[in-house]
Image: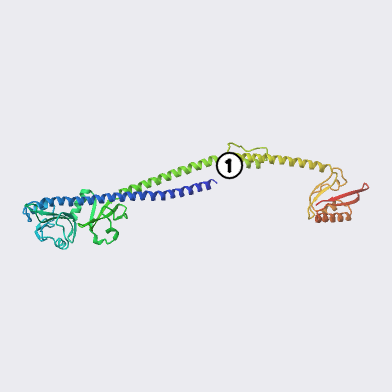
Amino acid sequence: MLRRILLFIGITLVAMLLIITLATRTVFLEGFSKLERSFLEVNLVRVENAIFDEIVDLGTTTGDWATRDGGRRFPSLTGTKLIDLRLDVVLSRDTAGRIVFGTTIDSAEKVRHVVPRGLRDWLAAHAVPAGTAEGIIPLPEGPLMVAIRPIRGSQQGRILGTLLMGRFLDAEEVKRLSRSLRLSISVASLSSHSLPEVRTQPAGVLASVDASREDVVTGSGVLRDIFGSPALLLTVELPRDIHVEGVKTLRYFILWLVVIGVVFGAVVLLVVQRTILSRLQRLSGSVLAIGTGGEPGKRVSVKGRDQIAYLGAAINGMLEALEGSHERLRESERRNKAFLDAIPDLILRVARGGEILDARLPPHSDFIRASSGLRPGLLSEIQTRFPFVPETVFSSLTDAVTQALGTGLPVVQEFSLDSGKGMQHYQARIVA
């Protein structure tokens, strides 16, 4: 029984631990995933705000220069100044949209008085407002952060054209932003991502999350161009500290569950052993000792007021009843023996096959001498022991036995014998 209880407790604990572990893992990891996604979203907004701040700063610089020199060629805007301002492109257009002045800084920080072909084509294909505008322009050369401000003359603020200043959002700029924000950032063209759910996501909202790796998690969002259309895919990569801590917490939680489960099982097993099994073992031992010891007067020890104590009391009551019935049986046997001893008759108990099972000889009978040493055997032996009994008497007694066994009713036979003391009359009663 102890093994079965131990097996039952073990299976129950394992099933309970599995259910709690699965439920807790689902709740914990889902909660940590939500927290991780929220943290990614916050950092995505930080990067977007940093890019927006760059564009705003670029707009401030552009507005400041648009009011200088009173013209559109900006002779004081030298290459050194462009490098100091971290500008990649500067151009001005007249009111008719013709480019009056244009200069760029190439990768070797050399000034070139040309406008990138991609920007020139874009300006030709899009109607840029004459007033204030800023944002991102996707170009073949790379995404360009631009600010556009009107150039005003000295006479009554007359608009002479527009000034455009731009800074490429290239690898160096992205690296600088990454160092500033202490984040891993990448920018890609949205043309390679044709998924509609990515294109329709608003700014500041995660378009996708990649948590396939155990060490880092990646979140992507959409950067929109100067007209508000989806233009770039901004990706932020974060170490999975939250996930790692969540998994570690879950493991500790499961470990503590296992420890608590084992302790609980051990306590339950100890309580069951001490309060139930050991008492049942003592109770069964006492009953066995009483049954095999031949001492019906003994009783089992009963302590407590629980079901086991009630069982012990019931066993004691049964033992008392058995003792009483045994005493009544012995009294009945003594009474029957007295009755039999008072009958001066020869009594034989014979099996159906003719075997003498036992015999009772009266203390004063003519058959004592002849039946001395009578023992269980065949009924035919009686004829040899009692030769003075005629053959006809034996034959009639055999028929009477057959009749009694066949009908189940008592049969009475009377006969006379001369045992050496004269003729005496006898009566034989055969009872099945």
The vertical placement of 276 against 409, above or below, is: above
Res. 49 in view:
yes
Q: Residues within 10 Å of mark 1 (few under 14, many from 20)?
A: some
Q: Where residue 235 sits in the image (x, y, percent)? A: 25, 55
User: Outermost residue, right direction?
Assistant: 422
Q: Relative to residue 416, is residue 35 drawn left or right?
A: left
The residue closer to the viewer here, 179 or 51, is 51
Give the x, y percent position of residue 429: 85, 50
Q: Residue at x 48, y 42 (%)?
A: 266
Image vertical order of residue 342 relative to residue 392, above or below: above
**Residue drawn 24% across the image and 61% down it:** 191
Depth check: 184 or 167 in front?
Answer: 167
* SS type, badge 1: helix
User: Which of these two is toward me, 376 or 312?
Assistant: 312
Q: Residue furthest front?
A: 156
Image coordinates of residue 183 in percent, x first then y, are: 24, 50
Residue on which the image places disc 1: 280
Could you say which quadrant of the image residue 290 lies in? Answer: top right
Q: Position of residue 390 (x, y in %)?
A: 89, 54
| Residue 388 shows up from this direction | no
At x 29%, y 60%, the residue is: 196
Question: Does residue 321 sit above or below 382 in this rendering?
Answer: above
Pick the residue in front: 177 or 280. Answer: 177
Residue type at mark 1: give it.
Answer: Leu
| Left or right position of 84 against 284 | left
Identify the coloring.
rainbow
Number of numbered discs overlaid on the protein picture: 1
Extreme top residue here? 303
Is residue 318 toward the left or the right of residue 212 in the image? right
